[in-house]
Image (cartoon, helix red, strand yellow):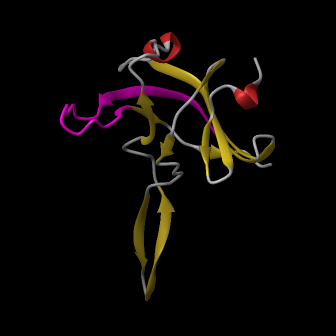
Amino acid sequence: MNLLHSGNAMLSGRNFLVTIGQEIFSFSKVSNLVAQVEYETVQEGGNNEYPLLFPKQKTSPDTLILEKGVREWTFDPRFNSLWEGMQVEQVTILLLKYGIILRKAFFFKKGLIVKRSFSDLDALRGELLIETLEIAHSGLVEIPI
């Protein structure tokens, strides 16, 4: 299978691929690409111009949000094998320019699918059904390119 033409989503002249384990998935939107640390502040005695900042252990995970449109005539058994409560490993998001030049890469080792949802159904509007997958993870890392 050609990785660069496997149904990857187009975004302003860029393509992106999402891999979960050994599988490649097609999503139309990836959001919440955030790496953050929780911290606490301490005022230093005698010097109150600014607080001192110290990292602390995370109390809540970060969440990656993946969205895709669902067509009524297509069936993706790989995507349907992802369900809430399932642990996933080796999740990678690759941002490609022109489908061949790797521009950015993000990765997390382990995650948990915490939510799978669908957009509202409204027969009067004729909108595309959007399926959303949320994965909680311990930390997103940008891979140096």
Q: Residue at x 75, y 41 (%)?
A: 99
| Left or right side of 73 for 2 | right
The answer, for residue 95, to whether it is visible in the render is: yes
Horizontal arrangement in the rendering, residue 67 relative to residue 16 (left or right): left
Q: How many marks?
A: 0
Residue 77 drawn above or below residue 120: above
- On the image, the x and y values in percent for residue 100 come to 81, 40
Residue 119: image quadrant is top left
User: In terms of image quadrants, where is residue 105?
Assistant: top right
Residue 93 seen in the current view: no
Residue 19 in which image quadrant: top right
The location of residue 3, given as percent across then percent down, is 74, 26
The residue lying toward the viewer, choosing from 136 and 4, is 4
Horizontal side, residue 43 vs residue 14: left or right: left
- Magenta portion: prevailing SS class: strand
Name which residue lies at 21% across and 31% down: 121
- Residue 96 in the magenta stretch? The answer is no
Residue 97 percent coordinates (x, y): 75, 49
Q: Is residue 128 inside the magenta stretch? A: yes
> Of 33 and 61, which appears nearest the observer?
33
Q: Quadrant of the N terminus?
A: top right
Left or right of 54? Residue 100 is: right
Q: Which residues are magenta?
A: 106-131
